[in-house]
Amino acid sequence: MKWETPEFAARDDMTNGWAVVTGASSGIGLEFARELARHGHPVLAVARRRERLETLSRQAAAQAGRIEPLTADLSTGQGLTSVVRRIEELNKVELLINNTGIANAGDFLEASLDREFTTIRVNIDPVISLTHNVLRGMVQRRSGAVINIASVVAFQPFPHFAVYAATHHCLHHLILSSQLVPVGHACRCRESYCCQRAAA
Ligand SMILES: NC(=O)c1ccc[n+]([C@@H]2O[C@H](COP(=O)([O-])OP(=O)(O)OC[C@H]3O[C@@H](n4cnc5c(N)ncnc54)[C@H](OP(=O)(O)O)[C@@H]3O)[C@@H](O)[C@H]2O)c1
């Protein structure tokens, strides 16, 4: 892959492995998947809406790109396990983009606890599980990157989106803390607006 940002431009070692994009059926994740495929990266695209992923896959194939759709509900242990299994089969993941996210709006006391806990599971569990799964290989190879899509609400209380804001606050601290793990070489950690990036 030809990285176009200055930070990644020198990382020509990141050319062979897979990119995994969660929440690839719409919005930011869909654009990430499309652009990565356009630049020659094989992409594992994860979401629940299979038909959208298959359309994305066909569009990429028409331009000689490769996007493999993987239907999984990341609010469930079963869905998460299926993604972890596929990642292990792929063997070499060079880029993980944790993008899946949902927001439950409304007054906290009126909110459905079921929806609040689903928000926590969807916004946090895949980030911890998938990052844990790919990071060891990246550290061993001294190559790879994890991008966590978060929000500016990670930095402030956000009335009517209390649990959503709390999940992004959690992601913010998770990425800052994970760079402190003694891995024997530098783990870089960058933040920008709604994105946080840790590169092994
Ligand atoms: N858009 C913004 O202005 C903004 C601002 C700050 C932060 N963000 C963050 O950026 C990320 C992407 O936002 P977006 O606006 O692009 O969102 P979006 O268009 O709503 O896309 C969300 C993606 O997550 C997937 N998803 C939702 N629940 C899922 C589940 N249970 N299992 C698997 N996949 C699931 C959806 O796919 P399926 O429905 O097909 O499963 C979809 O592909 C989110 O984390 C969001 O919090 C967005």
Image: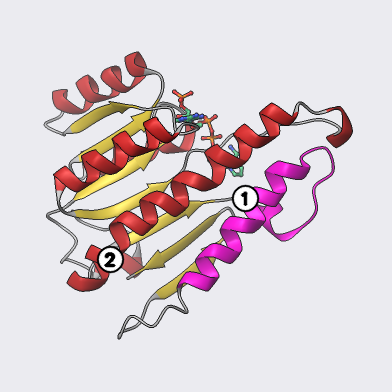
Instruction: Name the residue located 35 percent from the left edge and 82 percent from the top edge.
Output: 186
Q: Which residue is mark 2?
A: 136
Q: Identify the coloring.
A: secondary structure
Q: Quadrant of the C terminus?
A: bottom left
Q: Secondary structure at mark 1?
A: loop
Across and down, in percent, residue 121 comes to: 56, 39
Q: Looking at the picture, which amino acid does disc 2 mark?
A: Arg
Instruction: Name the residue located 45 percent from the left edge and 45 percent from the top edge.
Output: 126
82 inside magenta stretch: no
Q: Is residue 130 above or below residue 121?
A: below
Q: Is residue 75 above or below residue 152?
A: above
Q: Residue furthest bottom?
A: 184
**Residue 30 visible in image:** no
Within-10-Å neighbours for mark 1: few <14, some 14–19, many 20+:
many
Across and down, in percent, residue 175 comes to: 51, 65
Q: Residue furthest front?
A: 77
Seen from the viewer's position, the closer of residues 78 and 176 is 78
- Magenta stretch, main secondary structure class: helix
Seen from the viewer's position, the closer of residues 170 and 66 is 170
Across and down, in percent, residue 70 comes to: 28, 28
Q: Which residues are magenta?
A: 151-178
Name which quarter of the figure residue 69 lies in: top left
Across and down, in percent, residue 113 comes to: 74, 30
Instruction: Name the residue located 16 percent from the left edge and 53 percent from the top edge.
Output: 17
